[in-house]
Each structure stands twice: as structure tokens, then as C-alpha cells.
Image (cartoon, grey):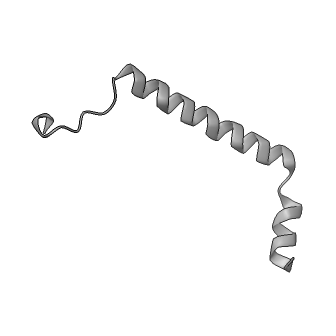
């Protein structure tokens, strides 16, 4: 393990990693929910 990897590994706590993943999962779920409300994106040629 290089010095840079050790420095990064010691400064990022497991709680921060879990919180970051939970926030990303929540953001993805919100994005999918919003897309389901709008019936997806309309990228058909007639739309433009």
C-alpha cells in the first residue's frame, strides 16, 4: 500500500462512506421517482 493510499484510507471514516452511499442511493431513488411521475423523458423528433 502506498503512502497516498494509507493517507486516504485513514482520513475517511467508515461512517462517512456509509452516509455518502446512502445519500447517493436516496438521490438515485428520487431521480427514478421523478422520472416515473413524468412518464420518462420525451426525446422524440416531434417534441423539438
Residue 48 rendering spot, x and y as whole percentages: 13, 39
Residue 31 rendering spot, x and y as whole percentages: 48, 32
Q: Is residue 46 above or below residue 6?
A: above
Residue 5 rendering spot, x and y as whole percentages: 82, 72
- The residue lying furthest to the top in this view is 37
Location of residue 43 (image quadrant): top left
Location of residue 34 (image quadrant): top left
Give the tally of numbered discs: 0
**Residue at the spot 81% in from the left edge and 76% down from the top edge:** 4
Q: Nearer the viewer, residue 16 or 25?
A: 25
- The residue lying furthest to the bottom in this view is 2
Residue 17 rendering spot, x and y as whole percentages: 78, 48
Location of residue 28 (image quadrant): top right
- The residue lying furthest to the left in this view is 46
Q: Is residue 48 above or below residue 2?
A: above
Q: Is residue 39 above or below residue 24?
A: above
Left or right, residue 16 beside residue 26: right
Look at the image and tell me in which quarter the N terminus lies.
Answer: bottom right
**Residue at the spot 41% in from the left edge and 23% down from the top edge:** 36
Left or right, residue 37 beside residue 33: left
Left or right, residue 9 beside residue 20: right
**Residue at the spot 81% in from the left edge and 66% down from the top edge:** 8
Amino acid at each position: 500500500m502506498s503512502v497516498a493510499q494509507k493517507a486516504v484510507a485513514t482520513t475517511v471514516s467508515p461512517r462517512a462512506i456509509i452516509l455518502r452511499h446512502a445519500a447517493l442511493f436516496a438521490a438515485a431513488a428520487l431521480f427514478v421517482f421523478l422520472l416515473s411521475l413524468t412518464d420518462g423523458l420525451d426525446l422524440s423528433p416531434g417534441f423539438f
